[in-house]
Image: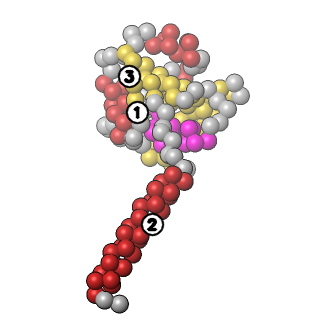
């Protein structure tokens, strides 16, 4: 075989290898499952509340897409969504058919969306120091409450943003 024929053969093999690589990559991309985008969280909050804005930023920092709707009368929003009065906090959110009341940590939201329990949603009653949006001071332990037609249960426990036990 002449040098010219060897060079042409190498070029043909290189092109075939390149085309095979492109085909494999394309086929691999087509067969990989699509990653579902996380649902958007719609937050109803008082336009003048700083801790609500802090919670929204916590969710965004965790990778969620958040839409904020300023509402001067949150009691109507809570009533419409079915949030029990004793679980009320300073803001209410909706995500993929669930309700989030108060300073619910992003990790609890992710777990809720992954597990999809039969519940209306999650709540952090009051405004515990150290919860997302309520940073500062000595963080208090608090419970995230799952609520709905079947009653209430403690869904997760936290100190600050860290899940415990």
Nearer to us in this view, 9 or 96 = 9
Span shown in magenta: 104-115
The reply to whether dot 2 and dot 3 touch (C-beta < 8 Å) is no
Q: Position of residue 101 (x, y in %)?
A: 50, 26
Provide the secondary structure element on which disc 3 rests: strand
Q: Which mark is residue 20?
A: 2
Closer to viewer: mark 2 or mark 3: 2
Residue at 51% x, 46% y is: 34
Residue at 40% x, 29% y is: 66
Q: Position of residue 86 (x, y in %)?
A: 56, 20
Q: Quadrant of residue 22?
A: bottom left
Nearer to us in this view, 27 or 137 = 27
Q: Is residue 27 left or right of residue 149?
A: left
Q: Is residue 162 left or right of residue 96?
A: left
Q: Position of residue 19 (x, y in %)?
A: 41, 64
**Mark pair 2, 3: CA separation:** 48 Å
Main SS class of the magenta portion in the image: helix
């Amino acid at each position: 075989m002449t040098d010219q024929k060897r060079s042409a053969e190498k070029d043909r093999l290189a092109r075939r290898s390149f085309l095979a690589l492109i085909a494999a990559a394309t086929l691999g991309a087509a067969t990989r499952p699509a990653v579902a985008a996380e649902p958007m969280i719609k937050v109803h909050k008082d336009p003048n509340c700083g801790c609500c804005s802090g919670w929204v930023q916590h969710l965004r920092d965790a990778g969620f897409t958040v839409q904020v709707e300023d509402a001067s009368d949150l009691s109507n929003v809570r009533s419409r969504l079915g949030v029990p009065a004793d679980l009320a906090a300073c803001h209410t959110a909706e995500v993929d058919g669930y309700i989030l009341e108060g300073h619910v940590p992003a990790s609890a939201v992710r777990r809720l969306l992954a597990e999809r329990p039969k519940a209306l949603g999650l709540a952090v009653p009051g405004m515990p120091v150290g919860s997302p949006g309520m940073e500062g001071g000595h963080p208090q332990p608090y419970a995230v409450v799952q609520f709905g037609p079947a009653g209430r249960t403690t869904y997760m426990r936290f100190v600050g943003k860290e899940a415990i036990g």
